Image (spheres, rainbow, N blue to C red):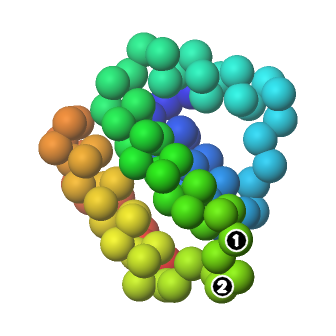
Amino acid sequence: MTCEELLQALNEYVDGTLDLSAAECQQFAQHLAGCNPCQLVVDNIRGTIQLFRAGEPFPLPVEFQQRLQLNLQQRWAEKFGVGESAEVR
Ligand SMILES: [Zn+2]
């Protein structure tokens, strides 16, 4: 799994459109174990997911999702110098 694939999966997971299988969880965990920037991002998102699941009755606002994606892309750009995959929904 590449960082990009992980980022994509995370986005879908946060969207609620992705259910991780056991195998995918393992790939996830394997990548994370060796990738510090991804660990940071996941830590960040984990807080979001917990908030989201803590009984908030409304879906994530679009603005928030866009901020989250921008945030992720910025981190990636800082770490890997990839800034041009700006396919923000
Ligand atoms: Zn990574």
* Label 2 neighbour load within 10 Å: few <14, some 14-19, many 20+: few
Q: Residue furthest front?
A: 55
What residue is drawn where x is 31% and y is 66%? 70
- Reply above or below: 18 against 43: below
Instruction: Determine which of the numbered discs, if any, sits on residue 64 in the image.
Output: none
Does residue 4 appear anywhere in the picture? Answer: no
Q: Nearer the viewer, residue 73 or 85?
A: 73
Instruction: Give the label, 1 or 2, closer to the camera.
Output: 1
* Residue behind label 1 places its C-beta within 8 angstroms of ligand 1: no
What residue is drawn where x is 80% and y is 49%? 19
Answer whether labels 1 and 2 touch (C-beta < 8 Å): no
* Label 1 element class: loop
| Amino acid beneath label 1 | Gly
What residue is drawn where x is 34% and y is 72%? 67
Q: Is residue 27 left or right of residue 11?
A: right
Q: Is residue 83 left or right of residue 39?
A: left
How far across and how far down the image is residue 57, in percent? 70, 82
- Reply above or below: 6 against 85: above
Q: Which residue is mark 2?
A: 58
Quadrant in the picture for residue 68: bottom left
Q: Is residue 25 left or right of residue 70?
A: right
How far across and how far down the image is residue 69, in percent? 39, 64
Q: Is residue 21 left or right of residue 45?
A: right
Does residue 17 appear anywhere in the picture? Answer: yes
Q: Quadrant of the N terminus?
A: top right
* Label 2 element class: loop
What residue is drawn where x is 79% and y is 24%? 23
Q: Which residue is mark 1?
A: 55
How far across and how far down the image is residue 16, in percent? 72, 63
